[in-house]
Amino acid sequence: MKEVMIFLQKYMGHLKRILPAEETYPNFGWTEEIYSEKPLKFVLGERLITATDVLETPKSPITIINKDRFTQMGKLEDWTYAINKLYQPEGEELRRFVLALGLASPLVAFSNIEGALINLRSDSSGYNKTSTLIAINSIYGHPARLMMKGKDTINSMWQRRAEYNSVPLTIDEFTDVEPAEASRIAYGMSEGEAPNRLAGSENRERDNYIRWKGMTIAASNTDFTQLIKTHSKNSAPELARLLQFDLENFPTTLDDGQTQDLVNILFRNNGLACVPFIQHVMTNKSSTQNDLNALTREVREEGNLNKQGRYWASICAMGFLGIRYANKLKLWDFDYDKTYQRVMDILAGAKAETIPLNENDTQILGEYLISRGPNTITINSKIDKRVENTFNDDDKREAVGEPDMIPKSSIIYVRQEPDTRFIFINRRDFVEFLKGRVSANAMVARLKEMGYVIADKVSKRLGKGYISTTPVSSIQLNMDKVLGKDAPK
């Protein structure tokens, strides 16, 4: 045995002398700091991208494990065709922006942040959340295999996040999350490192080499904003590290069949679009830095963001630059101006979410009720002047009467019932009123906790007893809580 060990040591020494050492890489993405004087290289699976070429990455455990994830197949023009069909139509501004954030994930290295958590959410399916994650993954490799699932453990997500580094990590069905965990994830993903842990066998911290500079993009039915607010009284610092897009008011423009046909094209054509984008950034490193700095200042000024809003400013600037560069490279053809305006409107709503809820939510509700004064009816629940002759004598006296306040418009959005002490408001109109300011679902949930909302999505005929109206989805409010001393008697 001793002779064998001596032989192996000598043979290894011989190999070192005759073969050049190959540099291996611990994770994907940029191999050097952006500001290093060394030439920039970008590791993508088994490909090593340089400014002028695509070489083979020296094999290592990480490239072998992820070989089937970072695929390259098909034609770039076919990928571009599918992406334009999916995200070019008007109404797709938010989904195309998140797609651009995926492409721009390598630009995090040029920014003053380490990462961020982006959440695409809706209460139900049919808003192309998963399809958008698939499209993001198709930029870098296999549309499905690069994706993690909400059922995966949080520790495995930290590990994969570090392995991908500059490549975006996508997580689908990220739904069953506790408030404390949501807060930890928002912080961790934006800090660029996993939480420290103790070693299993001794009383010391484990060596923590888990680092990254990239985007984490999730799709879920979970309102991370509300979860974080539930967990922390002072939630503003955590919320500033999260950018959530509520898609309830932004249905997709394509039907399921059209979407699936286009997604199938991405499964046959993927891992291609990242190369021209990354090589463009490498070739134009200084101008990329300048462009990102300028856009960050623009977003900060137009959005009136304070120091705490630096994450949002950087995130939005990277997404906008991703759209601009990809348009220039003909990777897609998106309307930059409409996307910019839509996202800035959402940013205003995200900013409003960080204001203390007991001041902000009730104020917004009050603004809505005042603005809908001409569309408000005040009427007791049993009054029904339309059917005066259908009541028996005992009920007629109570049923026949006039509304206390008649709406000035033929459209009724608000119904106040002094006898039941309820207010009903048209949910769709309320959601439209909140668009660009605050998440309707989150706000209703908070108002319910505070006792202002009694029930959500109640079917109610708002004109009952006065004019013929069909039932509409309504929010039922506590009149005395909402109006206080101004409530009608």
Image (tube, rainbow, N blue to C red):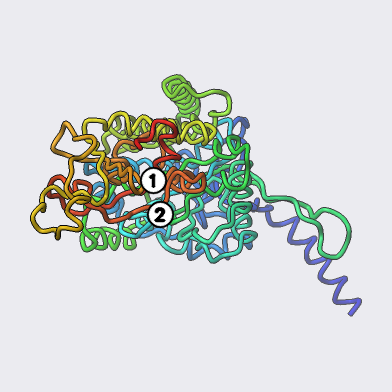
- The first of marks 2 and 1 along the sequence is 2
Of residues 51 and 416, the one nearer the viewer is 416
- Residue 317 coordinates in the image, percent (x, y): 44, 30
Confirm whether residue 225 shows in the render: no
- Residue 1 coordinates in the image, percent (x, y): 89, 80
Res. 429 image quadrant: top left
Which residue is at the far right?
2
Of residues 435 and 62, the one nearer the viewer is 435
CA–CA distance between discs 2 and 1?
38 Å
Q: Which is more foreground, mark 2 or mark 1?
A: 1
Mark 1, secondary structure of its residue: strand
- Residue 340 coordinates in the image, percent (x, y): 34, 31
Which residue is at the far front?
393
Of residues 309 and 381, the one nearer the viewer is 381
Which part of the image, by quadrant, shows the C terminus?
Answer: top left
Label 2 packing within 10 angstroms: few (<14), some (14-19), many (20+): many
Residue 147 - label = none
Mark 1 residue type? Leu
- The correct choice, above or below, for 351 with respect to 43 in the image is above
- Residue 8 coordinates in the image, percent (x, y): 81, 70
Q: Residue at x 41, y 45 (%)?
A: 478
Q: Residue at x 58, y 30 (%)?
A: 112
Residue 299 relative to residue 214: left or right: left
Mark 2, secondary structure of its residue: helix
Q: What residue is disc 2 on?
A: 133
Q: Residue at x 36, y 31 (%)?
A: 345
Confirm whether residue 154 shows in the render: yes
Q: What residue is disc 1 on?
A: 477
Mark 2 residue type? Leu
Q: Residue at x 32, y 29 (%)?
A: 370
Label 1 packing within 10 angstroms: few (<14), some (14-19), many (20+): many
Of residues 265 and 348, the one nearer the viewer is 348
